[in-house]
Image: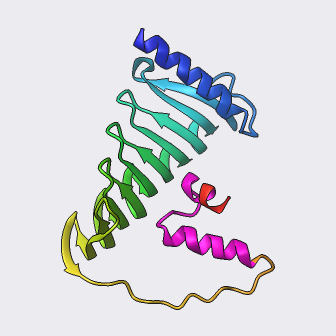
Amino acid sequence: MMKHLFLLLSTIFFLNAHAQSNLPACTSHPFHYCYGKETYGGGVEVYMGEFLNDEKNGQGTYTWADSEKFVGVWSNNKPRMGTKYYPRGSKYVGEFKDWNRDGQGTYAFEDGKKYIGQFKKGNYHGYGTLYNSDGSIRQQGIWKDDQFVQAQTPPVKEVKPKPTVNNSQDIKRQKCIRLGLVPGSVDFQQCMN
């Protein structure tokens, strides 16, 4: 029963998502420049999104059997920038490399705590800030392999707006970046709108 419900919900999501894609529907393998659905693990894992040369390329969503989900940009079958939702309610928004959190990102815990900063191979690594669930700073500074190494406040840079025709868009963009959102991610696009 649960498997049938999962497949029904997946199909509904696919039809909704496909309405937003400009690519033609994938009809048969190999998937060459199209939008489609592919299942794995006996049908309990699903990818719905864009394909190029029979690989996940472009915008897409992958859902695992345990409800873990990645929504974002794919390149050569690997996630690059986007949002990963975890089964217990936490989520990561940011950059990926080789299936790991890697680069700039934000990890929001299910209890309301949040880490905003740099990641390497899935770990806090580089400059970052860990916030308590009430928004107060718990630790801020340099991290290495998930371990807090050195307290440090961020360098203060004067941000001068670039002269553009649409200065309000630049201001919105800077605000979204300061919130820890990664350009190109779904959350960043929502922030810009």
Residue, x 57% and y 72% (percent of image)?
A: 175
Q: Position of residue 171 (x, y in %)?
A: 65, 76
Q: Residue 53 is drawn in which quadrant?
A: top right
Depth check, front residue: 90 or 126: 90
Q: Is residue 53 visible?
A: no
Check if residue 142 falls in the magenta segment.
Answer: no
Image quadrant in which the N terminus is located: top left
Question: Up-down: is 44 above or below 184?
Answer: above
Residue name at image x 49 percent, y 28 percent:
46
Residue 11 seen in this snapshot: yes
**Number of numbered tags placed on the structure image:** 0
**Observer-nearest of 154 and 73:** 154
Q: Which residues are magenta?
A: 167-189
Asked whether 173 falls inside the magenta stretch, the response is: yes
Whole-percent x, y for residue 21 in the image: 71, 39
Q: Along the line of sight, which residue is nearer the eye, 138 or 7?
A: 138
> At x 38% / y 27%, what residue is drawn?
65
Quadrant holding the C terminus? bottom right
* Left or right of residue 50, residue 180 in this image: left
Image quarter for residue 133?
A: bottom left
Residue projecting furthest to the front: 134
| Residue 26 placement, left or right of 105 | right
Instruction: Tell me the chief SS of the magenta region.
Output: helix
Image coloring type: rainbow
Up/down of 39 relative to 81, above or below? above
Q: Residue furthest top?
A: 1
Q: Position of residue 151 (x, y in %)?
A: 22, 81
Considering every residue shown, the one lying at the far right of the view is 165
Which residue is found at the position 56% from the left and 87% from the top? 159
